[in-house]
C-alpha cells in the first residue's frame, strides 16, 4: 500500500501557498509569522514521526516433518503425492447431483452471506481508519438578526439592530506522530483479511456438510434397497413355511417366526424414512431452499472414497482458511499494542479556519469581510492513574491470547488430518473384512435354508442365519457411509484446495475490485482410492 501521509516537501509547499493566500487579504501583512509557525510545527511533526509498538513476526507453530498415519503402516495417500486439491473439490466424486448442490452454496446459503457481510463491514472499517491520515474539513453558514441592549456601556452596537451574514470553513489535521493511525490501519487490514478467511472457512464447512449429508442419504438409499431385496426373500420364506404347514411338514411356530422376521425387517425399512427425510431437509436448508420445495430422487450409494493428497504438514499452515484467519488476528492484536503505546504521547493538532462575515449583504463577498485563523495545538494526558498502562497490558494480553489460539488452531488442524487418515486406513481394512463376513453369512444362510427345505432343521436355525446375514450386510453399508464421510472430512481438513494466496491484498481491501471480477476455480485433480 502506498504511504498516504504528506511529505515534508509537500507540507512546505502547502505552507507557502497558505502564506500567499493570506497575504492577498487587505490588512493581513502580519500573517507571515503565524503561517511560519504552522508550517514549522507540521514539518517537525512529520520529520519526527515514528511508529510505536512491535513489528509483526509470525510466531512459530508446532509442526512435524510428516503425518504419523502415513508412516510405517503400509498405507498412504494415492499418488501423485504432490498433487493438491483445486477449486471445486467435490467434482472428484463424479456425481452430477452433488455438483449441482455444491454450486448453490456460495450464492444461496445464508450463513455464507452473513460471513460475506461481516467481511464487507471489516473492509469498510479500514476505510474509516485510513481517513484519519487526512484533514477533517467542515463548513458552516448562517444568518441572524439581533438587537443589542441600549444599557451597555462602551459598545458601539448598543441599541442597534444588526444583521449577521456568515459562511466559513474549518480544517483540522492530526499528524500521525506516533503511528497510532498507522497501527490502527494495519490492524484493520489484518482483521479484514481474517474476515475474508472466515468466509472461505464457512463456505468450506457448508460444502463439506452438504457432501457428508448427501453421501449419508445415498447410503440410506442403499440400505433401503438392501432391505427391499431382503423383504422379498423373506416373503418367499413365509410362503414356503405356509406351504409346508399346509402339507403337514412345518409347524405354526415356523410360520410365526417367518412372519416375525418379515414384519421386523419391514419396520426397519420404514424407520429409515425418518433419517432420509431429515437429511433431505438439512440439504435443502444448506442450499438456501425451503424443505417443502426440495427433494432428491432415490439413488443408492455407489461413490468411491477419495484419498486426498496430503503434502507435508507445514503446507497445512498455508492451506487452511481457519489457520489463516487466526494468523491475521495475531497481526491485528499486535497492532493494538502500538495503538496503546501511542496513547502515552501527546497529540498535535493543526487547525485552519476561514470565511466571510458581514452585517450588510452587499459587503458580504468583499475582501474586508474575510476572517481566518490558524495554528497548532498540543494535547496530552498528564495523569490517568494507570489507565493507559492497563490498556497496554490488555493489548499485550490480547496478543498473547491470539498466539495461543493460533497454535491451538494449528494443532487441531493436524489432529483432524491425522484422524481422518486413520479413519480411511482402518475403515478400508474393515470394509475388506466385512465383505468377507457378508459372503460367509450368505453362504451359511443358503446352506441352512436348503437343509430346512429338506426337513433336516427347524426354521429357528434359518431365522438366526437370516438375522446374521442381514446384520452383516447393513454393517457393510454403514462402513461404506463412514468411509465417504471420512473422505470428505479429510478434504475439509486439508483446506479443500484453498490457499493463503487467495486472501485479498492490502490494495484489494483499500480499493475493492469489481464484484463481478471473480477468478474462476480450476478443476481439481485428486486420485481416487
Image (cartoon, rainbow, N blue to C red):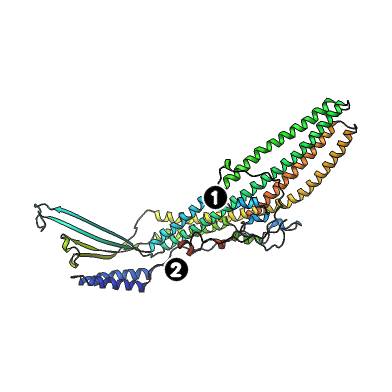
Mark 1 or mark 2: which is in front? 1
SS at mark 2? loop
Give the structural element (helix, strand or loop) at label 1.
helix
Residue at 77% in and 32% down: 261
Q: Quadrant of residue 126?
A: bottom left
Which image quadrant for residue 371?
bottom left
Q: Is residue 454 left or right of residue 229?
A: right
Left or right: residue 68 compared with residue 283: right
| Viewer can see residue 494 | no
Decide which of 2, 375 is in the foreground and name it: 2
Q: Residues within 10 Å of mark 1 (few under 14, many from 20)?
A: some
Q: Residue 68, percent across and down? A: 70, 57
Given residues 424 and 399, the one toward you in this image is 424
Rendering coords of residue 270 (x, y %)? 69, 35
Q: Which residue is mark 2?
A: 2
Residue at x-position 84% and y-position 33%: 461
**As drawn, 469 above or below 428:** above
- The local crowd at label 2, few if under 14, some if 14 to 19, many if 20 or more residues have their Cα within 10 Å, is few
> Residue 339, labelled with which disc?
none
Give the labeled residue for mark 1.
108
Q: In the displayed structure, would residue 470 be above or below residue 182?
A: above
Gap in angstroms between the C-alphas marked 1 and 2: 37 Å
Question: Is 423 displayed left or right of 409 in the figure?
Answer: right
Quadrant location of the C terminus? Answer: bottom right
| Residue 51 visible in the displayed image | yes
Residue name at image x 66 percent, y 53 percent: 490
Amino acid at each position: 500500500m502506498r504511504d498516504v501521509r504528506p511529505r515534508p516537501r509537500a507540507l512546505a509547499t502547502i505552507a507557502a501557498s497558505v502564506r500567499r493566500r493570506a497575504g492577498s487579504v487587505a490588512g493581513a501583512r502580519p500573517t507571515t509569522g503565524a503561517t511560519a509557525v504552522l508550517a514549522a510545527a507540521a514539518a517537525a511533526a512529520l520529520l519526527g514521526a515514528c511508529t510505536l509498538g512491535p513489528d509483526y513476526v509470525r510466531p512459530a507453530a508446532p509442526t512435524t516433518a510428516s503425518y504419523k498415519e502415513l508412516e510405517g503402516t503400509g498405507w498412504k495417500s494415492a499418488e501423485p503425492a504432490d498433487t493438491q486439491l483445486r477449486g471445486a473439490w467435490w467434482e472428484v466424486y463424479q456425481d452430477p447431483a452433488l455438483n449441482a448442490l455444491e454450486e448453490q452454496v456460495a450464492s444461496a446459503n445464508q450463513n455464507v452471506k452473513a460471513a460475506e457481510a461481516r467481511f464487507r463491514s471489516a473492509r469498510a472499517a479500514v476505510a474509516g481508519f485510513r481517513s484519519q491520515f487526512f484533514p477533517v474539513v467542515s463548513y458552516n453558514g448562517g444568518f441572524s438578526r439581533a438587537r443589542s441592549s441600549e444599557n451597555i456601556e462602551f459598545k458601539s452596537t448598543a441599541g442597534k439592530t444588526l444583521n449577521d451574514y456568515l459562511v466559513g470553513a474549518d480544517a483540522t489535521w492530526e499528524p500521525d506522530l506516533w503511528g497510532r493511525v498507522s497501527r490502527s490501519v494495519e490492524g484493520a487490514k489484518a482483521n479484514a483479511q481474517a474476515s475474508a478467511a472466515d468466509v472461505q472457512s464457512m463456505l468450506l464447512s457448508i460444502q463439506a456438510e452438504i457432501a457428508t449429508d448427501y453421501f449419508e442419504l445415498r447410503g440410506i438409499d442403499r440400505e433401503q434397497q438392501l432391505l427391499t431385496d431382503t423383504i422379498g426373500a423373506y416373503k418367499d420364506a413365509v410362503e414356503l413355511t405356509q406351504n409346508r404347514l399346509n402339507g403337514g411338514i412345518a409347524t405354526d411356530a415356523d410360520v410365526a417366526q417367518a412372519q416375525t422376521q418379515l414384519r421386523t425387517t419391514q419396520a426397519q425399512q420404514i424407520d429409515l424414512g425418518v433419517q432420509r427425510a431429515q437429511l433431505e431437509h438439512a440439504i435443502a436448508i444448506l442450499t438456501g431452499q425451503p424443505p417443502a420445495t426440495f427433494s432428491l430422487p432415490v439413488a443408492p450409494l455407489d461413490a468411491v472414497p477419495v484419498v486426498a493428497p496430503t503434502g507435508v504438514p507445514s503446507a497445512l499452515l498455508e492451506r487452511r482458511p481457519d489457520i489463516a484467519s487466526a494468523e491475521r488476528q495475531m497481526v491485528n492484536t499486535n497492532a493494538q499494542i502500538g495503538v496503546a503505546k501511542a496513547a502515552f504521547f501527546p497529540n498535535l493538532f493543526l487547525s485552519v479556519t476561514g470565511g466571510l462575515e458581514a452585517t450588510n449583504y452587499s459587503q458580504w463577498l468583499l475582501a474586508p469581510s474575510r476572517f481566518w485563523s490558524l495554528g497548532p495545538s498540543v494535547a496530552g494526558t498528564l495523569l490517568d492513574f494507570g489507565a493507559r498502562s492497563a490498556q497496554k497490558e490488555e493489548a499485550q494480553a490480547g496478543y498473547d491470547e491470539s498466539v495461543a489460539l493460533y497454535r491451538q488452531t494449528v494443532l487441531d488442524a493436524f489432529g483432524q488430518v491425522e484422524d481422518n487418515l486413520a479413519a480411511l486406513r482402518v475403515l478400508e481394512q474393515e470394509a475388506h473384512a466385512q465383505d468377507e463376513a457378508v459372503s460367509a453369512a450368505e453362504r451359511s444362510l443358503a446352506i441352512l435354508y436348503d437343509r430346512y427345505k429338506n426337513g433336516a432343521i427347524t426354521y429357528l436355525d434359518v431365522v438366526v442365519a437370516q438375522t446374521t446375514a442381514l446384520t452383516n450386510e447393513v454393517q457393510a453399508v454403514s462402513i461404506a457411509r463412514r468411509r465417504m464421510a471420512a473422505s470428505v472430512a479429510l478434504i475439509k481438513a486439508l483446506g479443500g484446495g484453498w490457499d493463503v494466496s487467495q486472501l485479498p491484498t492490502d490494495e484489494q481491501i483499500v480499493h475493492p475490485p469489481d464484484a463481478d471480477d471473480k477468478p474462476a476455480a480450476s478443476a481439481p485433480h485428486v486420485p481416487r482410492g
